[in-house]
Amino acid sequence: MRIALGVTGGVAAYKAAELVRRLQQEQFDVEVVMTRGAEEFIRPLTFAALTGRKVIGSMFGAGAGEPANVESAIEHIAVAQRIDLLLIAPATADILAKLAAGIADDFLTTLYLAARVPVVVAPAMNVNMWEHPATQENVGRLRAHGVRVVDPGEGYLACGMTGAGRLAGFEAILEAVRESRNARRDLAGETVLVTAGPTCEDIDPVRFITNRSSGRMGYAVAQAAAERGARVILVSGPTALEAPAGVERIPVRSAEEMCKAVEQRIEESTMAVMAAAVADHRPALRHPQKLKRGPLHVTLDLEMTPDILAEVCRRKKDRIVVGFAAETESVAEHARRKLAAKPVDLIVANDVTGPDAGFDVDTNVVTFFTRDGREQALPKLSKHEVADRILDEVLRIKAGAGLPGAHGKANARQA
């Protein structure tokens, strides 16, 4: 398997030499692409000696003094076509921003746009740079595009500060490479309908009832399903998140709109993951004009919104249906009650008051409740990891039910 290792201009660039050796021990064929900044920290000759290959640094020509030619002008395309994976380690804040924005101003960024292979990036930088909202926004955008980001470790940094920003350990980077190499396609042939985000129920033209859902869990499910080969239909309430690459997103606002969108597309799906935090109530009367401030006592009469999960269950047939239970107390009790009331195959329950499992955070702590009586509590995981575990459980349920295609997919994963 051929890997292009992109090395960018940070102090951790020297670690890339050892990373080359570790990749070679895993039987990877490595060629190195360096940015101009990287060459200020470590010389190309080091990587040429380790790999036995030319190190690519310039967009036009192999190095200083060499004239550009037709081959060098399109070399980024040739490299993109012959590699199986692109790894960038260390990845600076600058390169993350360029990749997220689609800027192609050197060989490495152009290679990223041209390659149709798994991409793994391992950031390394000062803690303040890593924690800056702009960097975190860029990281989120890359993840939404399907890039696997290996978060930096914490500790003493070269700048003298302490915190997150150190290049992740070699084993963590290698594990990400292995998993990307062995990317699962066990959902190929499936169509997964996912709901995500909150709904907004209008009081008047400027005010509405909603909740604190960010949509991250549902979007993580959509991304994970797409990465595993599924066709994904994402019905999303209002959220700032970008649709994952390859996912069809249907934007909606209210519970009524979400229900109609789900009803229109449910028959296309083989699996439905209802992760949206749908408002249970809406104003019975929507005021046509903005309610003015003043000594006015207004009673807000509420009515129930459509029960989207119940409608999906009514039209369930052979499809696997996953429901969510976001609770603030008696989580297990409420989850079991929901499982008994609706013929869902799996309830994913969590306590949203927890600091690592509530709204608008990157992690979650959930428990699975299944119709066959299994209750499985998961440790704190990233929402993408939780999404993969949900899909693993869906395939287990499907295989146990003997549904079409289930046994073949299950056996393929075991092999």
Image (spheres, rainbow, N blue to C red):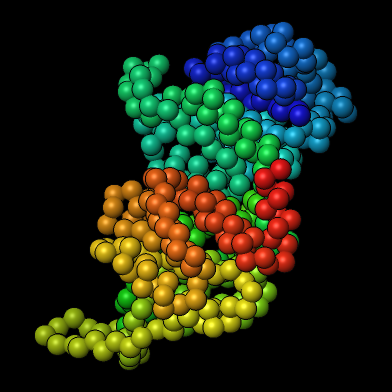
Outermost residue on the left side: it is: 295
Measured as percent of width and height from the top left, residue 180 is found at 64, 38
The quadrant in which the N terminus is found is top right
Identify the residue shown where x is 55% and y is 16%.
15
320 and 77: which is toward the camera: 320
In the rendered structure, the answer to whether residue 284 lies left or right of residue 405 reads left
299 and 304: which is toward the camera: 304
Q: Is residue 295 above or below residue 167?
A: below
Measured as percent of width and height from the top left, residue 6 is found at 64, 26
Q: In this view, does 346 lie above or below 96?
A: below
394 and 96: which is toward the camera: 394
Outermost residue on the right side: it is: 70
Q: Is residue 364 above or below residue 3?
A: below
Q: In this view, does 110 lie above or below 202?
A: above
Residue 373 in sight here? yes
Identify the residue shown where x is 40% and y is 16%.
158
Determine which quarter of the picture holds residue 403. Answer: bottom right
In the rendered structure, the answer to whether residue 51 lies left or right of residue 348 reads right
Identify the residue shown where x is 42% and y is 49%.
378
9 and 65: which is toward the camera: 9
Measured as percent of width and height from the top left, residue 362 is found at 41, 48
Identify the residue shown where x is 72% and y is 8%.
49
Measured as percent of width and height from the top left, residue 156 is found at 35, 19
In the rendered structure, the answer to whether residue 356 lies left or right of residue 231 reads left
Residue 238 in sight here? no
